[in-house]
Image (spheres, rainbow, N blue to C red):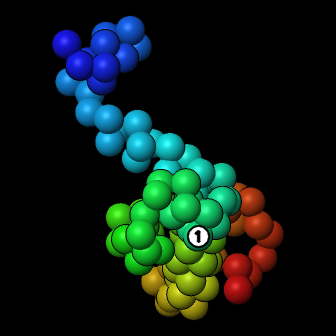
Amino acid sequence: MSAHDRARGLAGIKDGHPHRFRDTFAVELLLSGVPLERVSVLLGHSSIKVTERHYAPWIRARQEQLESDLERSWARDPIVLAATKGTPEVHGQKGVVN
C-alpha cells in the first residue's frame, strides 16, 4: 500500500488522487486572493503560464472583474431595465433602476 493510499484511508476519502488535494490547495489560495505568481511558486511550476492555464478560472480578481463587466452590461440592457422598473420591491429600490 502506497503512502497516498494510506493517507486517503486515514482521511476517509474514497477514490482520491494526490492531485485532488493539490488542486484544492491551489484553488483555495486563489479564492483567498493570493496572487497567481505566489501560487505558481508554491505548486513548483516551472512557469506561471502553467499555473495560469490550469487555475485561471479561480483567480478572485478576475472573477470579480468578469462579474462587474456582466453587471454593467446588464444594467443597460433594455429587457432587464423593462423587467426591473415595474418591480422595485423585488430589487429593493424605489424609482428608476438606472
Residue beneath the point at 46% across and 83% down: 79
Residue beneath the point at 55% across and 54% down: 42
Q: How many marks?
A: 1
Q: In the image shown, does 87 or 50 lie closer to the viewer?
A: 50
In screen coordinates, is 20 left or right of 61?
left
Residue beneath the point at 58% across and 70% down: 37
Amino acid type at mark 1: Glu
Let me know if residue 86 appears in the view.
no
Q: Position of residue 54 (x, y in %)?
A: 35, 64
Figure quadrant of residue 50: bottom left
Mark 1 crowdedness (10 Å alpha carbons): few <14, some 14-19, many ≥20: some
Figure quadrant of residue 30: bottom right
Q: Position of residue 92 (x, y in %)?
A: 74, 60
> Could you say whether the residue bearing mark 1 is in a helix, strand or loop?
helix
Residue under label 1, please give it: 37
Figure quadrant of residue 94: bottom right
Quadrant holding the C terminus: bottom right
Q: In the image shown, does 95 or 62 lie closer to the viewer?
A: 62
In screen coordinates, is 35 left or right of 49?
right
Quadrant holding the N terminus: top left
Q: Position of residue 39 (x, y in %)?
A: 56, 59
